[in-house]
Amino acid sequence: MLVKQRPDAEPAEVRTRPLADGAALGVALKLLGIGPLLILILLVVGISLATPNFLKPVNLGNILAQTAVIAIVAIGQHLVILTRGIDLSVGANLALATVIGGLVYRLADSGPLVMAAMLVAGGLVGAVNGIVYVFGRLPHPFIITLATLSIARGLALELAVGHTTMRGMPIEIAFFGGGSTLGIPNSFFVVFGVAALVLLMARAMVWGRWIYAVGGKPEAAVQMGIPVKWVLVSVYVISGLCAGVGAIVLAGRTEAASPLYGNLLELDTIAAVIIGGASFLGGRGHIGHALVGAVMIGVIRNALNLLNVDVFFQMIAIGAIIVLAVEADVLRNHLEARVRVMQSGRAS
């Protein structure tokens, strides 16, 4: 006896095709998620094969030391970008903080006092950014942070003795910025400490969840009663404090303060965050992303130096990687949209 198939029945291969597509999309999203770390590993392997000097302990220590400032400041930039913002003032803020520290050092040879001065200077600039942006109802933080970039740089040049580099720093600051422990630069431990503290705050405090909510769905965050304005102010203050910590490390490494420090640091930190996998659309990212991006920038520059590649090509390489990182973010958003559509189709 023949059994007639229902007209609406689908062949097995048609029913299983969406499941296979969903699995493929899931794998693609996971690869995009670990893409920056995978690229970094491949870079290290390829560069070590091209130049044997790359994996020498001395060179690896140089990479960690050279990357420390970018990594520290990128942590603060990462929080800002999580909220769909941007902080263009971090480089000038760092320069001003070193100058303030240098001036305080001329009055009192006290490491803790000089470090406190740098942190306060950085935090104040960050507070101005956040307060003016939020309560001044500016359309985008680009405006105020661009303004404070110019103001902070001008103040640094005006306040610096002779409008140039001021030599000398307390031994405590030189220890953190230029010293080493067991062959590892002390600046690496500073990076680790800042990252651990910010990660603890983001994971253990409700403030961390608020940041992701504000960046992911600003309108919903307001409806949920989240203090959106003060969350935004807080991330700019922390970004400023990270610039202050970066100032301590850089001043300690060079044992000097200069109004010229931090030139284009804002671009390096933005690049580190985006290369690491965070999104300009906000609400997505991890502190580790900023650190991976910072190390990747340091590795690329170090490798090109070892290979005697002109410095201009270093800028081209970093720019090309930023474009690829942004395109990866666009692709990830497209794939996530497709996954949501498939999931809603299954549910119905």
Image (spheres, helix red, strand yellow):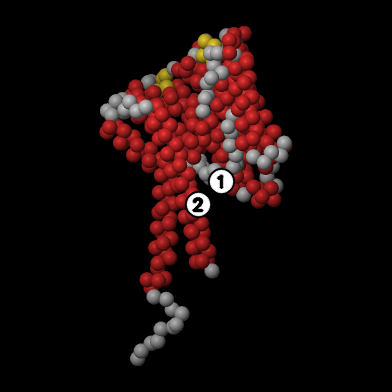
Q: Residue at x 65, y 51 (%)?
A: 220
Q: Quadrant of the C terminus?
A: bottom right
| Residue at numbered disc 2 | 333
Q: Quadrant of the N terminus?
A: bottom left
Q: Residues within 10 Å of mark 2 (few under 14, many from 20)?
A: some
- At label 2, which amino acid type do we have? Asn
> Toward which corner of the image does residue 259 lie, by quadrant?
top right
| Residue at numbered disc 1 | 281
In front: 154, or 342? 154
Residue lying at the far bottom of the rendered structure: 1
Q: Residue at x 53, y 19 (%)?
A: 260
**Among the two numbered marks 1 and 2 on one chain, the one whose residue lies closer to the N terminus:** 1
Taking 283 as reference, is 292 left or right?
left
Residue 202 visible, this angle: no
Taking 225 as reference, is 108 left or right?
left
In front: 16, or 149? 149
Q: Residues within 10 Å of mark 1 (few under 14, many from 20)?
A: some
Q: Do callouts 1 and 2 mark residues in contact (Cβ within 8 Å)?
A: yes
> Toward which corner of the image does residue 280 lie, by quadrant?
top right
Q: Residue at x 64, y 24 (%)?
A: 151
Disc 1 to disc 2, C-alpha distance: 10 Å
Q: Position of residue 246 (x, y in %)?
A: 53, 24
Q: Position of residue 314 (x, y in %)?
A: 40, 31
